[in-house]
Image: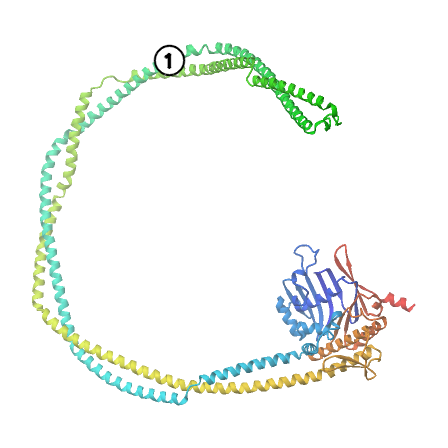
Amino acid sequence: MRLIRIKLQNFRQHADTTIEFRRGLTGIIGPNGAGKSTILEAIGWAIYGSAAIRGTNDTLRFSRAPGRSRVQVELVFELAGHEYRVVRTLNSAEVYLDGSTSPVATSIGGVTQYLERRLGMSREEFFNTYFTGQKELQFLAQMGPTQRARFLSQVLGYERLRVAQERARQRRNELRHEAEGLRAGLPDPDALRAERIAAEQRRKEAAAAVREAEKAARAAAERALELAPRWQAMQAARDQDRELAHAMSLARTELEAAERDVARARAELEAALAADAELAGLREQLAALPTVVQECEELAERARLMERRRALLDTERALVAELAEMDRRLAVVEQAPALAEQYGRELEAARRELAEAEQQVSDRLSEWVQKKEEVRTRLETYRKRGHELKEQMRLLEQAGPEGVCPTCERPLGEEFERVLARLRDEWEVLVQDGKWLRQRERQLAEKPEELTRAETRRAAVRAAVEEKARRLARCQQAVQELEALRADRRQREERLEKLRAELAALPADYDRARHQQAEARLRELRELERRASRLEPAAEARPQRERELAAAEARVEALRTRLAEIEKRRADLAFREEAFRDLAALVERAAAEQRQAELRLVELRGVLQSAEQALEAAVRAEAEYQARREALRAIEAELRHHEELDAALGELRTELNARLRPELSEIASAFLSELTDGRYTQLEIDEKYDVLVLDEGEEKPVISGGEEDIVNLVLRLAISQMIAERSGHPLSVLILDEVLGSLDVERRDNVIQLLHRLENRYEQVILITHIESVRESLDQVIRVEYDERTGASIVREESIQPVLEGLAS
């Protein structure tokens, strides 16, 4: 695997970072917290997703990124001759192969699984192989012997053997339980054989009984078949007799109905003849109907005009009365303009008088309120002074001559009595003045007589103003009413003239008695007309009634002939119900015997079927026994196989663990010799997986802290190389994170030189450090700094050519 390029967008503190990786030794240099290790975290996240980061995906977004901004890492690397481009975001992931525009894998989980198969490493194996951090250098020293062995087995893939052995043991236990269950469930083969023989005998006996029952059923069926023709003929005769009886009943019913139709037709014909005779007399009386109708119409028109004349006369009288009332009202209303002007002047004078009365009330009220407030204020002042005097006298009487003056605060001595007497005199004066003020306050509690008179005058003036305003409003309303009355009077006069003209055109003669006699005659003739209308259909239907009577009489004769024929056919049939019942009983006995024989046959066939099923069950039980016996043999064979597999895996683990320590010691010794310039040439790992450094064949008991870091480093390199060899992939890239911090300058240079000498093994070595002095020894320098203003990491590639030229000069 070789890293080519990585691009970070809003990934932790990297807002927008792009790094091109080259072959050789690359240094990522920057202060602590600048975001160096975040680049390695982004590589792991691009390949393995959220399992390779600190925290969760929610913590990845750049803290100062805009809302809903995209978090993305794009990683390009080469593996086994192919170039892979991985693009992963918080919600998606894609892999592109060899520059293709179509992804070969999509979805978050799908990309992780695809890359894990291509790399041939799980996340733990990948990080243990390619990544080494400062905290990981002393991982073996911090573990116990058992933990060291388990860790090395795990990182080198030997843990898979343990998992396989556990699975083999689990399967072995499952097979053992299955075999025990099968053995416990196997039946006795002799009992199965005896059950099969008994079932065969029962089936043979049941088959013989079925054959006998079939013979009996056939005999019963033949007897029933012999009676079938007689029974069918008897049933046909009974059905024909019932049909003839039903036909006779219908014929009698129809004959009765036809006879009723004849009687009805005769009655209707008689009614038609009577109606025709009565109708002839009515037509003679109805000859005068048109003349009477015309006379009634003329008299009705004169009655209508007379009613119109009376209504117009009533309206005329009402209009004359209304005009008289309007004349009276006009005589009153015509005085309104002059009265309105007079009342307007009087209202203005009354309003001025009201304003004067309002001002007088306000002045008297203000004077009264001012006096009450003055008395109340003086009373409050006297009360406060009275409280002060009482307190001063109490204190003086309590202190006696030894007390101090309440004014000058000097001891009273001989002045005690005089000061106390002065305070008491002042108290008496306050009491007398207070009594006078309280009496004055009671006097002022009621309204003064002047204020009452002013309020009475104001009320009288206000009432006068309101009365004059009402009069003025009525006069103004009357002025408006005057024009309306004049216009209304003109309209009513015009209406009266038109009404009198219409009255002059209406006739005044109308004979009510004659009108009533004509209407009575008309009602009599209308009644006769309705009677004639009712009789006409009956008279007109006389020919139809004659035809209906003839048809009904012919139908009666035909039905009587038909009934006689049906009675003759039934007598010729000679069907007897007793003979039918006797034959029916005989047929029923034959059918019962046939059903009984068939039921017996069905029963015996059920017994035969049960016997056959029992035989099949016995045969099936023997077959199942053989199948379960074969399954038991197969399980026992598989059980022996898994027992042998468990033992073999155990031996293989033991052998691999035995070969692990020498091989790891050999690889680590080669790295140690190169790193220490041959001072230490051998490193051994004992049975407890403790690391021993040999100096010229002798164990060196004490080593410095820097030497311990070198030992841990070479051991870590050796483990990485073994992991890569066993995974089938060359160890082409190595990433070291802050492994130089505890080394002195010389050891640090030796590590750098060792890493250069490892270029034939690793195409890329990426060194993350905060030590500036190593930059001139690197093939590529990537500077990482933190910008406090933007809160983002700034990454740039530095050229090391000026540094080399400076060293050369």
**Which quadrant of the rendered structure holds the N terminus?**
bottom right
Horizontally, is 733 left or right of 236 in the view? right
**SS state under label 1:** helix
Residue 284: quadrant of the picture: top left
Horizontally, is 472 left or right of 780 in the view? left
Q: Which residue is mark 1?
A: 325
Residue that appears at 76% across and 79% down: 691
Residue 418: horizontal and vertical position, in percent? 71, 21
Residue 417: horizontal and vertical position, in percent? 70, 22
303 and 82: which one is in front? Answer: 82
Residue that appears at 70% across and 56% down: 65
Residue 280: quadrant of the picture: top left
580 and 654: which one is in front? Answer: 654
Q: Is residue 508 above or below residue 24?
A: above
Q: Amino acid at mark 1?
A: Glu
Horizontally, is 434 left or right of 676 in the view? left
Residue 628: horizontal and vertical position, in percent? 46, 85
Residue 208: horizontal and vertical position, in percent? 27, 87
Residue 636 seen in the figure: yes
Q: Is residue 197 above or below residue 298?
A: below
